Image (cartoon, helix red, strand yellow):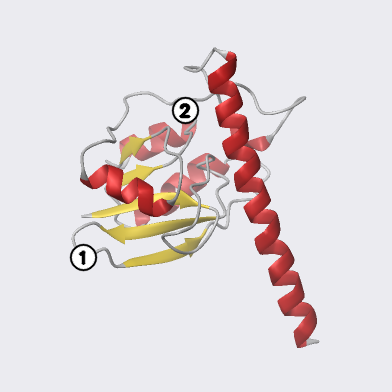
Amino acid sequence: MKIAVSSVGQDLNAQIDPRFGRAPCFILIDIETLKYEAITNPNVNAMGGAGIKTAQLIANQGVEVIITGNCGPNAFQTLQAAGVRVITGAVGTVNDAVNQYKTGALNSVNTPNVESHFGMGSGPGPQPPMDQPDANKEISVLKQEADALQQQLEMMKKRIKELENKE
């Protein structure tokens, strides 16, 4: 069985990206053998439709389960239509998520957990997830997103240095 985890990095020690549609990459894992591969998400900077396009990307990989922090309604519907089960609320590393999944600690959900365009950063800041109205949960989501963005920034700086050294 193949699962996917939204990630800010390209290995099992990378942090989970709380955004589904705009996660920089996904780790695809064979849950029986633990063999994995990282795929880059080409929809990170899409002007619109990132969730739907990313859901199609994941479904086309033969994934049966996606583990992520948040999933909006358009991506959720696309994943459901493709038969991909969705697990939201994941935090920590990709490896943590795999272990939690294998022990049955993570369960699929029947509804999206955030509004449309949650990961776009529109407005004065990220919108609170629909099912997390209290301040402590919103703080937790915001911290996850800040950590993911920090790791993404570090990856970008590293790549810039690599490219500059080739010149």
Nearer-the-camera pick, 99 or 108: 99
Quarter assignment of residue 33: bottom left
Q: Judge left or right: residue 118 versus residue 36.
A: right
Quadrant containing the N terminus is bottom left
Question: From where the camera sits, is residue 10 visible?
Answer: yes
Quarter assignment of residue 138: top right
State the residue at coordinates (57%, 38%).
144
Q: Judge left or right: residue 8 versus residue 127.
A: left
Task: Name the residue furthest top.
Answer: 134
Q: Which residue is mark 1?
A: 33
Q: In the picture shown, does residue 118 fall above or below 55?
A: above
Badge 1: how crowded within 10 Å, few (<14), some, or many (20+)? few
Q: Return the disc, 1 or 2, that comes first in the chain's sequence.
A: 1
Q: Nearer the viewer, mark 1 or mark 2?
A: 1
Residue type indicated by callout 2: Pro
User: How far, Cα to Cα, is label 1 from label 2?
Assistant: 32 Å
Q: Which residue is mark 2?
A: 73
Point out residue 157 in the picture as x, y percentages from the top left corner.
74, 65
Point out residue 165 in the picture as x, y percentages from the top left corner.
77, 84
Residue type indicated by callout 1: Thr
State the residue at coordinates (57%, 58%).
42
Q: In the picture shown, does residue 136 fall above or below 155?
A: above
Question: From where the camera sits, is residue 58 visible?
Answer: no
Q: In the picture shown, does residue 24 fall above or below 110?
A: below
Task: Name the residue furthest bottom.
Answer: 167
Nearer-the-camera pick, 75 or 128: 128
Point out residue 142 in the picture as x, y percentages from the top left corner.
62, 31
Q: Secondary structure at mark 2?
A: helix
Q: Judge left or right: residue 49 versus residue 38.
A: right
